[in-house]
Amino acid sequence: MTVKDLNFSWGDNEVLKGVDFSIKSNEVVSILGVNGAGKSTLIKCLNTILKPKEGTIKIITETDESPIASLVDVSSLDLVALSRVMSYVPQSVRTSFSMDVFDVVLLGRKPHIKWRISDDDRSKVSETLRYLNLEDFAFRKFDQISGGERQRVIIAKAIAQDPNLFLFDEPTSDLDLKNQIQIMKCIKKLIKDSESPKSALIAIHDINIAARYSDKIMLLDNGSVRAFGPPNEVLTEQNIADVFSVKSSVELTDEGYIRVVIYDEI
């Protein structure tokens, strides 16, 4: 995906200002920033829930006119075509409908189903449930499981959709610590091990989880990209102070990951 000069406003309030970045195949990128920095708005612009004021958003895909994969402007894609190449997990899911977890995940296959649900579709759902350790939930009702369990199911639905680009808006916000780590490991493994071109963009608040599981960090500050690159280049004490208004120390762990320790507000 490539994004050029993206701008978005709510009336006179500029939310995104000249946002430029690109995401390569088999790459995990995390967006960090304070509340109101524009993280969720950016993700909603990318999947056309919101219409940018200016700018272009292009993603690698195949069209009926051109079976050879190429960069295509997302605004030219209809909903089905867009859903084949991009999946979206919102911050939270609120629903009162009663449906088996298996069928909720099966909804992710809808962009690929032409006449009827195939054995391959069902196999993809079963494989995804196993991948996220959700087999025991397969035939439980979606409206009768916890908020964290629902979040994992919606992530499974996005994975079963089998897109080129995953958009996750705070996918770990409702999860306990163990499941936060497991989900991020699963996302990274999925992207790295994929034989087809896949990437993920994740809006997240936890700096250390982002640093450990991301190839690159986008530091969003007041609607603009303050820094974009590898965690060790972006997550400096100065950048953290400027964006989050906190004092910190940045250390390199024995495993080679960046660890940020927050001391106090500035």
Image (cartoon, rainbow, N blue to C red):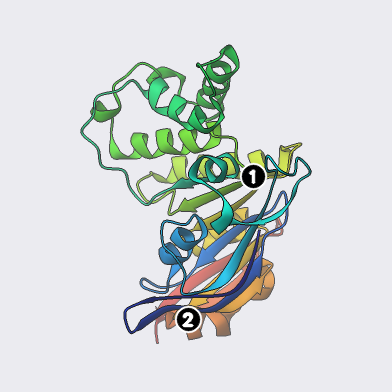
Residue 231 sits in quarter? bottom right
Task: Indicate the position of residue 88 as horizontal and vertical percent values.
Answer: 47, 47
Whether residue 117 is situated above or below residue 157 in the rendered picture: above
- Circle 1 sits on which residue? 164
- Circle 2 sits on which residue? 243
- Placement of the N terminus among the 4 image quadrants: bottom right
Q: Residues within 10 Å of mark 2 (few under 14, many from 20)?
A: some
Q: Give the residue type that dot 1 points to.
A: Asn
Is 251 left, or right, of 103 in this rendering? Answer: right
Instruction: Classify mark 1: helix, strand or loop.
Output: loop
Whether residue 211 is situated above or below residue 165 in the rendered picture: below
Whether residue 137 is situated above or below residue 47 in the rendered picture: above
- Placement of the C terminus among the 4 image quadrants: bottom left
Q: Which residue is drawn at 39% across and 50% down?
A: 90
> Which mark sits nearer the N-terminus, 2 or 1?
1
- Eye-nearest disc, 2 or 1: 1
Q: Count the numbered circles shown.
A: 2
Q: Give the residue type that dot 2 points to.
A: Val
Is 80 left, or right, of 227 in this rendering? Answer: left
Q: Are marks 2 and 1 in contact (CB under 8 Å)?
A: no
- Residue 4 seen in the current view: yes
Task: Indicate the position of residue 68 as horizontal and vertical percent values.
Answer: 79, 43
Name the outermost residue toward the top. Answer: 119
